[in-house]
Image: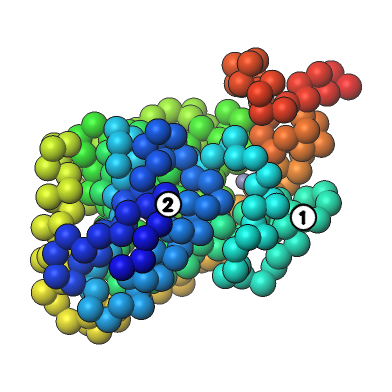
Amino acid sequence: MKSFDTLLYEQPAPQVARIVLNRPETRNAQDTKMLYELNDAFNVAARDDAIKVIILAANGPHFSSGHDLREPHPYQNMLQYETVGTWCGFTCAGAEAQMAREKEIYLGFCERWRNIPKPTIAAVQGKCIAGGLMLIWPCDIIIASDDAQFADPTVSFGVDGVEFFAHPWEMGVRKAKEFLFTSDWISAQEAYRLGMVNQVVPREHLQEAALAMAQKIAKKSLFALKLTKEAVNAAQDVQGRVAAMQTSFSLHQLAHTHNLKVYGMLIDPTGLPPETAKALGARIESKQD
Ligand code: ZN
């Protein structure tokens, strides 16, 4: 079985694959390597005809703290991998590299994972922040532990929401605006009430509940499951999801380009503690220029 540095790939039951994020020391912060490994792991499960259902889980107290903003040389690191898209240009100047990277490993991967023609189940515990949402939202079913909390604080950092802009579809338009405008947390119970998660279970039963759901689904015909997933996804897509996400992705790139011009980095660091902003290489004095 294929092994990974940042993930575990398991088969906890017949016909069920489980991919486990395994960088708990970083709260499963997603760097380039982890995202390419995750894409590889999804490929392994998707291409194995003996697998019917894929679980995405995470080791440690928290599901994911989001994208790893401290990764050294993120653009050069892209060159180590065979890309899934053809946009490329990861070391180009200006906004080109940033857009290329985000189109490949953020929007591109999320869209690809969302369309894997097998049921996927996210099992989420603890904090799931910003880019963390981009791992669970592409899944078909989300099971949360009762201590799970969700936030997209990107507006606090001068960006208009994460790259896979599923908020209006996940929680409804009005709540999505509040979630983004305030950067407030929502609890597992609130996420359940909004329809963003399917079940809330005690933390100690999270993996058991995800596996039970996977095994129940795995009893069905894989072809029927594939067709059903296509049908439900199509219902969402004919409502304009893809076009809306392309619009929000373009606005997201405008926000990054603005921040790069003003602060020398992709986010507005004025909301960060000064030492963190400095460590990330912020050019805060530019705000007064
Ligand atoms: Zn971005």
Q: Position of residue 236 (x, y in %)?
A: 41, 66
> Taking 180 as reference, is 41 left or right?
left
Quadrant in which the N terminus appears: bottom left
> Is 196 rendered above or below residue 54?
above
Query: Mark 1 is on which residue type?
Result: Thr
259 vs 17, nearest the viewer: 17
- The residue tagged 2 is 5
* Element type where label 2 sits in the image: loop
> Taking 219 as reference, is 102 left or right?
right
* Label 1 Cα crowd, 10 Å radius (few <14 / some 14-19 / many 20+): some
Q: Position of residue 60 (x, y in %)?
A: 30, 36
Q: Is residue 28 visible?
A: yes
- The residue tagged 1 is 91
Mark 1 vs 2, N-terminal side: 2
**Residue at horizontal 68 percent and vertical 44 percent from the top:** 73
Query: Mark 2 is on which residue type?
Result: Asp
Q: Position of residue 136 (x, y in %)?
A: 37, 51
